[in-house]
Amino acid sequence: MKKNNNLIIQPPEGYIDWLAELKIKIHNAQQRATLAVNNELVLLYWQIGNEILTRQEKQGWGAKVIERLAGDLRNSFPDMKGFSRTNLLYMRSFAECWSDEKIVQQLVGQLPWGHNLVLLDKIKNKIVAEYALSDKTQPMGIAEFKLLESLPAKLKTQLPSIEDIERELTRGNDE
């Protein structure tokens, strides 16, 4: 009901139900649009990651190209987020884990990018090791290594501790 100069105007018959139906249609259309945008972005991220993988494998590009690509993409698209070095590395890992584009289009693409990142961080039997080679004269360095997090509890207790490994290495050097 709407007031007009202290008069209460009654909506026409069926108006309230029609308004409720329109609200549902609008909400559903907004949801479909959001999912479509998400699907396109996830597919784009997979394509970028796949191209990084391909070029690194075929042309021997190192990790420095990702840092440069991140800067170049941010400069070209200053209003867009998602082109950081870290996110490009995630895109690469994403394409490596789900190498078939059809899987991305049908299943994984339905999830928001943030949910895909959580999956990437928690995948069974995957050792995450991010490496960087600045040039041929620099040694390879491990930036991150997560093994214990992905092992079953039974195996965790059977592995030697860091201290045990260090003690063994020290003893080996003394002999």
Image: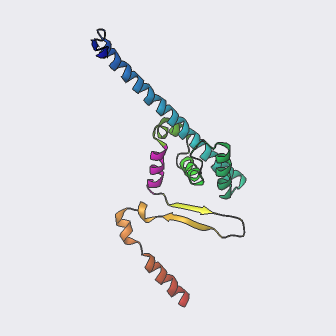
> Percent x, y for residue 135?
71, 65
Q: Which residues are magenta?
A: 113-125
Location of residue 173 with respect to 89 vertically, above or below: below
> Percent x, y for residue 147?
46, 64
Nearer the observer, 155 or 63: 63
Q: Can residue 175 be spotted in the picture?
A: no
Q: Residue at x 37, y 62 (%)?
A: 152
Q: Is residue 123 magenta?
A: yes
Residue 78: image quadrant is: top right
What's the image's color scheme? rainbow
> Percent x, y for residue 154?
34, 65
Q: Can residue 56 be spotted in the picture?
A: yes
Q: Main secondary structure of the magenta part?
A: helix
Q: Residue at x 56, y 65 (%)?
A: 143
Nearer the observer, 58 or 47: 47
Quarter of the picture holding the N terminus: top left
Nearer the observer, 13 or 11: 11
Q: Is residue 34 magenta?
A: no
